[in-house]
Amino acid sequence: MVQELGISCSARALHDLVKREVPQLVFLMEARLSSFEFEYIKRRIGFPLGLIVDSSGKAGGIGPAMAKKFSH
């Protein structure tokens, strides 16, 4: 339960930051999250596209996420 609350608070804070700054790409790194938790956060912040590499042991995972409309 505590971990779920932590993820919700983190996702909410990241969502607020993304809403304020409006980036096209977000890169989550050294996150000790499962692929399910990464996916939840990606969708919560409105970045459905991207790749997830799960954490392994003490090593954190990575997850670049892109907005639907990505212009380079």
Image: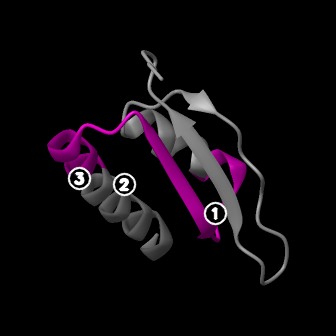
Residue 11 image label: 2
Image coordinates for residue 39, horizontal then vertical, percent: 59, 40
- Three-letter residue code for mark 3: Leu
Q: Which residues are magenta?
A: 15-37
Cα distance between the residues tagged 1 and 3: 20 Å
Indicate the amino acid at tag 2: Ala
Label 1 or label 3, whichever comes before in sequence order: 3
Q: Residue at x 37, y 66 (%)?
A: 5
The structure residue drawn at horizontal position 84% and vertical position 79%, both measured from the top left corner, is 57
Mark number, residue 33: 1
Q: Earlier in the sequence, mark 1 or mark 2?
A: 2
Q: CA distance from mark 3 to mark 2?
A: 10 Å
What is the secondary structure assignment of the residue under circle 2? helix
Residue situated in front as seen by the camera: 53 or 6: 53
Q: Is 29 contained in the magenta span?
A: yes
Dot 3: within a 10 Å radius of its alpha carbon, few (fewer than 14), some, or many (20 or more) residues?
A: few
**Residue ID at (36%, 39%):** 45
Circle 2: is it few (<14), some (14-19), or many (20+) Cα within 10 Å?
many
- What number is the disc on residue 17? 3
